[in-house]
Structures are given as C-alpha cells and as structure tokens.
Amino acid sequence: MLFQEAVLFPESITTEQQSLMLVKRLLAISVSCITYMRGLFPESSYGTRYLDDLCLKILREDKSCLGSLQIVKWIQGCFDALEKQYVTVEQGKDPALNMRFGILCLELKSYLLSLGSPVHVLHVAVLAIYTNPETVTEMYQFKFKYKNKVPQMDISSNHREFVAGLCSKDVKQASRLLLRTLYLLMQDLGPLPNDITLSMKLLYYNHVTPKDYQPPGFKEDGSPGDLLFAGDPINLKVGSVSTDFHFMKVRVTTEKKRVKRADSNLIPKNGPTEISHQGLDCEEDEEEEECTKV
C-alpha cells in the first residue's frame, strides 16, 4: 500500500513535517477513492483501512495490474514535488498503457501562475477522465498551498462552519468529512463507459523550481492544455483542510447530466457553474465563488 502505518493521520499537527504527512495521505486516499468508486481497477489493486466507521480502499502496488502500478507511481511523484515545494517546467506524457477497463494515459502539464498577493508555491493536481481524446467527462482538482502560518482550521459542510484549534480530533474530523463527501459524490455519478482515458496534470508556480527537475514517473510534454466538456459543466466544492503549514482543497467538475439525482444537494442551486473551456481556472478568488459546499 501507499503507506503501511496503522495510524492514518498524525495525532497532532504542530510541525511542518506532520502537516505534510497529512496532506500526502489525504491526496493518496482521495485518488484511491476516485479510482475505486469509478471502477477503474480490480479489487486486488486495493488494500482496506478504516477511519472510524469509514472503510477506505487504498491503492497498492498490484503487479498484475499495470494501470494501478502507474497511478501509484504518479502519486509518489506528487509526494516528491510536495516535499520539495515545487515542480518543473513543461512536463509530461507517459506512454499509454492497455488495460482491462480501457486506456490509461498519464500526463503532467505545467503552467506559470501568478497571484496578486505573495504566497509560497501552489500545486494543483488534476485527475481528468476522458471519453475521447478531446472531451472531458469528469475532472477532480486537488489544490495545495504552502503558507507561513494560519492560526486555525476551517471545516465547512453544507454551509456549516466550524473553527477549532489544531488538535487530533479536529484534524480527524476535517479529513473524515472530506473523504466521506468524496465517497458520497462518487456514488451519485453515473457509470463510466468501458473505454476511457485517465489524465493527470500538475499546475504550479515555477519561480522556485529547478529547470531540470521532473517528478518521478513524468516527463516533458508540449501538447495543448485545453480541457473541454461536451455538455454543461458544474463545479462542486467537496471540502478543504487547513493547517498552519498547508491548505488543501478538493473540487469536482463534471457534466450536469452525469449526476444521477436531479435533486442532489451537490448541484449548485443557481444552476451550472461556468468554467473556462480553455483550461483550468486556478485563481485563488474562486474560494469566494457561490457554489454548494458539501
């Protein structure tokens, strides 16, 4: 498995290293959840762990499934970039792998981002599922921000907000809420077709990144970065976790018709959320967008 320790998350978040461990594990568990609930890999590619009453399926190195092995390699490459607090310029596309559930294509795309206020490094890890080479049907964004200090943790769900100190109970509550919401969303999406392409991208600031650095498992790519949806996309905020050292947010974008229940509380009350059809919206002011929080 991606990690072997009995305790899923640190008991307390008082150091940058403990915060980094939390963020890395949340990313690994979230990606594992998506691939498991969307039926991308066989049961043998997952191990089972529990967070209270929440059963978690976590990817492991299954030598009988090349696709899951490659995803594990990608996650480990993200770990490397998170540890170093940078990724590199123009990275890219791995060879396509033939697999039982369709075609797996891993790629890493870089963009130079800029914000008005000073921050350290922002990472955006994007998992996109394509029904054909040009059309995205589902997109999962994991946003990471490094910061000097934030004095409290914010936990948001269905417009409820809790503010608490950085203790073990609060970290577990925030993380559990994020993962449970993601699991519920996966159950609310319609089934995928048999043949899909799975794409993974990283967006970042490159002002601190050595030009010769490439995360393990990725290489240079010069293809266009447009992400186009065939139908009307909706933008769903799953949740976020914040510590004194890191901020992590999860967002899902999909076609409205793919959400099974029309009355789902995941759909914004004001209708579909417009997103850029020329790529990803990576501005920090999107935090203030009117969008249903789950």
Image (cartoon, rainbow, N blue to C red):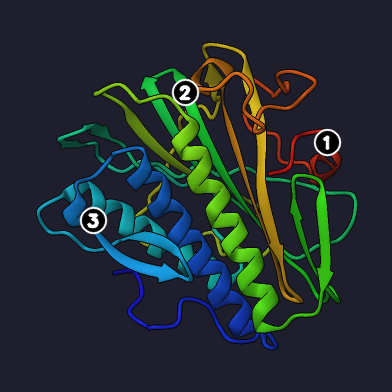
Which SS class for mark 1? loop
Residue 183 image offset from top left, x and y in percent: 48, 47
Q: Which residue shows up at 73% across the image and 23% down it?
A: 273
Q: Residue 69, labelled with which disc?
A: 3
Report the front residue among 239 and 207.
239
Query: Which of the two residues, 79 or 1, is positioned nearer the viewer here?
Result: 1
Circle 1: residue type = Glu
In this picture, is 293 found above or below 135?
below
> On the image, which quarter does residue 29 sit in?
bottom left
Q: Which residue is mark 1?
A: 289
186 vs 135, nearest the viewer: 186
Labelled pair 2, 1 in contact (Cβ < 8 Å): no
Q: Residue at x 49, y 20 (%)?
A: 258
Q: Residues within 10 Å of mark 3 (few under 14, many from 20)?
A: some
Q: Is residue 239 left or right of residue 150?
A: left
Q: From this viewpoint, which residue is outermost toward the top?
A: 231
Residue at (60%, 65%) from the top-left corner? Answer: 175
Drawn side of residue 37 relative to residue 152, left or right: left
Question: Which amino acid type corresponds to the residue marked 3 in the rendered image?
Answer: Leu
Question: Does 128 sit above or below residue 124?
Answer: above
In x, y percent, where is residue 291?
77, 34
Q: Which residue is mark 2?
A: 137
Q: How many marks?
A: 3
Q: Is residue 86 visible?
A: no
**131 over 167 or under it: above or below:** above
Q: Identify the residue at image location x=68%, y=63%.
A: 241
Q: Residues within 10 Å of mark 2 (few under 14, many from 20)?
A: many
Question: Which label sits in the foreground, 3 or 1?
Answer: 1
| Label 3 or label 1, whichever comes before in sequence order | 3
